[in-house]
Amino acid sequence: MDTTQIRETIQMVKEDNFDIRTITMGISLLDTVGGSVEETAKNVYQKVTTYAKNLVVVGQQIEREYGVPITNKRISVTPVSLIAGHADEKEILVLAHALDDAAKEVGVDFIGGYSALVQKGFSHGDLALIKSLPKALTETDVVMSSINVGSSKAGINLDAVKLMGETIKAITDKSDTANSKMVVFANAVEDNPFMAGAFHGVSEPDVVINVGVSGPGVVKRALEQVKGESITVVAETIKKTAFKITRVGQLVGTIAAERLGVPFGIVDLSLAPTPARGDSVAEVLEEIGLEQVGTHGTTAALMLLNDAVKKGGVMASQGVGGLSGAFIPVSEDAGMIDAVQAGTLSLAKLEAMTSVCSVGLDMIAIPGDTPATTISAMIADEAAIGVQNNKTTAVRILPTNGTKVGDMVDYGGLLGTAPVMPVVDKSSADFINRGGHVPAPIHSFKN
């Protein structure tokens, strides 16, 4: 980095809420399978604590030396259902606790990968893991989970969609906040460093470092300098800003990997907001020209933002991956919360926006009495957008018992505070209860 870039980075950190959102170490667990689930759990703990023992220390060193905040240090592992063997829903909890204990031992913020990939059907381990989720997510502190229910190649497993709606309700009965630790995907990616959806794909190296960077505040500040300019200038400004952000992520990731003695994987350039004012994707969209996010034109502005971010990132790093784009979680974004409370932003508009952004219906509080089949239908809609458009979509819906529309639910820290949003009160039960498999779209046949 030359002197000008260093000065720009210092300004981004001090004035624009720029941070490296996460350094995530991906660790394969395929070689940890033992003769019993207890033996496997012991091997999992040993491998995670061996490889990640210096992850937090190295992250802190880089923060001090380069002056760039690294908000989280995280671990992702092979989807646990793949190493579960014959374990049932009670026995597999031993693996959840082994992950939790290992993560606490090395001091990371989260460990992701208590996951299953069920887009075409269930294995024994998949069903055991899903059925264990209400206990796994309430008995552990830093374990994160993801379930992939659809893909453009496989279609949508409607039985899994139905089961996940029921599981989300069962989790709610145990905790008002535990669903924030689980996401339901279509087209999940193998190198995503962001939680709750991070897992270490089977095609990844044994151990790897992936970096997630975030800078909505930086993008907003850059757009403030081009007020009144054409949308062409706006797109170019976003692209150049994304380039700068990604270069910092590439630097941090390369140094971290070198010091830890493992390969460097990818930079995920996702504009991930925080609850802080000035660090909001909604505010970026409003800087583009919307009076408030959710009004007409929001989807178009978001498409522009997402595309320009990806183009700038690809120019800056040989390894851009993960999700890379713009996140629109409601609870984690001050501008999104404002729009919901003003009545400008609805679930229907958020669904439309997910067709052009990085993830989907994310961190959205709904009334606790919402039927499981309605939640499943929300998942099905998001999966359909992802499968048909060959993109990643996801749902992290948070039903909260004892709340009504307009109440605020606090999830703490980066997870923020969400206003409870209204849900359409007409039933989707007959559709969801059909079960079966939604076939892959015709464009999936490419061989």
Image: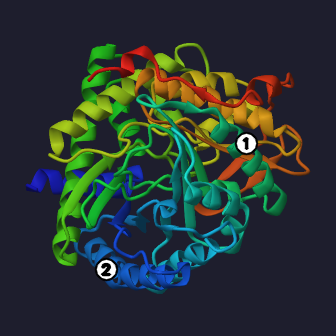
Q: Amino acid at mark 2?
A: Tyr
- Earlier in the chain: of badge 1 and badge 2, it is 2
The image position of residue 64, as x and y in percent, is: 28, 76
Asked if residue 245 lies left or right of residue 424, the reply is left
The image position of residue 3, as x and y in percent, is: 10, 56
Residue at the extreme right: 402
Query: Residue 263, located in which quarter of the rendered image?
Result: bottom left
The residue labelled by disc 1 is 165
Q: Nearer the viewer, mark 1 or mark 2?
A: 1
- Tell me the CA gap for discs 1 and 2: 36 Å
25 lies above or below 361: below
The front one of 86 and 408 is 86
The front one of 443 and 220 is 443
Q: Is residue 293 visible in the rendered structure shown here?
A: no
Number of on-image labels: 2
Q: Amino acid at mark 1?
A: Gly
The image position of residue 15, as x and y in percent, is: 38, 52
Name the residue rendered at 40%, 86% in the picture.
46
Name the residue rendered at 38%, 59% in the picture.
200
* Crowding near the residue tagged with mark 2, few <14, some 14–19, many ≥20 C-alpha atoms within 10 Å: some
Q: Secondary structure at mark 2?
A: helix
Give the label on residue 51, or none.
2
